[in-house]
């Protein structure tokens, strides 16, 4: 099977798996991350098949939709790729990307796996968490979990552990300070850093307008 065929088969699998998924973690999220990955990869020396598969499979079973189980996605990806007879080294690398890509993983004090391929896919995923789409995804998920938009009496927790982050039920606006506004400075690649700048500024402008409207000043 050629690399192109492997990617086509993987796309078909992901589309089927994510039918009816929450709007911020559906096929279109995967598609955007895939496109961002290929864009960033142009300027990086990486294995294009690894980053492509990592992007396509990184959210096929997000732990927050699977009772917090972080092993479901990597296992599903491994089974799929083995069925497509993908080289074991590539399968292992893709699984490592899925296991370590999430923001909450960066809050873990233990030493984590890293590779240039992980950095590229991670930047692509983080880009989709900020800017106009990032804002839409945040509020979509907040609505999905029935969270408050904003509560002035609940301050953002800027020192969360991984477990605290996973269990948080804070208002959606808090998520900007606890994650979204931090991502610009956590980009790994030069391309990712440049692409993040405009999206970061858009979020700052949005928050300024949000508070004006909240306080009856606009």
Image (cartoon, rainbow, N blue to C red):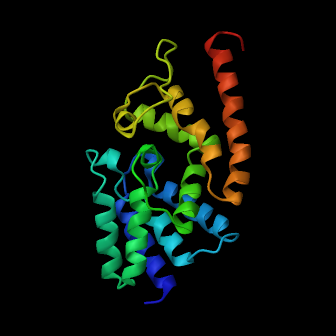
Left/right placement of residue 90 relative to residue 39 reads left
* Direction bottom: furthest residue: 1
In this view of the protein, which residue sits in the foreground, 88 or 26?
A: 88
* Residue 132 seen in the figure: yes
User: Does residue 59 appear in this view?
Assistant: no
Q: x, y percentage for residue 168?
A: 38, 31
Q: Residue at x 71, y 10 (%)?
A: 217
Position of 58 compared to 34: left or right?
A: left
**Quadrant location of the C terminus in the rendered image:** top right
Name the image quarter holding residue 92. Answer: bottom left
At x 49%, y 62%, the residue is 114
| Residue toward you, 140 or 198 | 198
Q: Residue visible at 57% across and 42% down? A: 134
Residue 150: give x, y in percent of width and height: 51, 20
Looking at the picture, does residue 191 appear above or below residue 88?
Answer: above
Position in image of residue 76 (x %, y %): 30, 66
Number of marks in picture: 0
Furthest toward the top, the residue is 216
Q: Is 106 situated above or below 48?
A: above
Q: Residue at x 44, y 61 (%)?
A: 113
Viewer-proximal residue among 90 and 15:
90
For the N terminus, the image quarter is bottom left
Give the x, y percent position of residue 194: 73, 53
């Amino acid at each position: 099977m050629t690399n192109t065929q492997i990617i086509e088969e993987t796309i078909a699998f992901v589309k089927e798996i994510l039918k009816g998924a929450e709007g911020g973690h559906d096929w279109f999220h995967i598609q955007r991350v895939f496109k961002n990955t290929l864009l960033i990869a142009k300027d990086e020396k990486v294995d294009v098949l690894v980053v492509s598969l990592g992007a396509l499979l990184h959210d096929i079973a997000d732990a927050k939709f699977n009772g917090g189980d972080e092993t479901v996605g990597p296992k599903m990806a491994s089974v799929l790729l083995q069925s497509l007879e993908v080289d074991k080294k590539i399968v292992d690398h893709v699984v490592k990307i899925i296991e370590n890509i999430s923001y909450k993983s960066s809050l873990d004090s233990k030493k984590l796996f890293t590779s240039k391929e992980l950095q590229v896919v991670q930047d692509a995923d983080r880009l989709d968490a900020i800017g106009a789409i990032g804002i839409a995804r945040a509020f979509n998920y907040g609505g999905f979990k029935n969270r408050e938009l904003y509560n002035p009496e609940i301050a953002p927790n800027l020192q969360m552990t991984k477990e605290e982050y996973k269990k948080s039920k804070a208002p959606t606006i808090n998520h900007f300070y606890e994650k979204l506004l931090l991502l610009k400075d956590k980009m790994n690649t030069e391309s990712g850093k440049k692409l993040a700048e405009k999206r970061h500024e858009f979020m700052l402008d949005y928050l300024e307008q949000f508070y004006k409207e909240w306080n009856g000043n606009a």
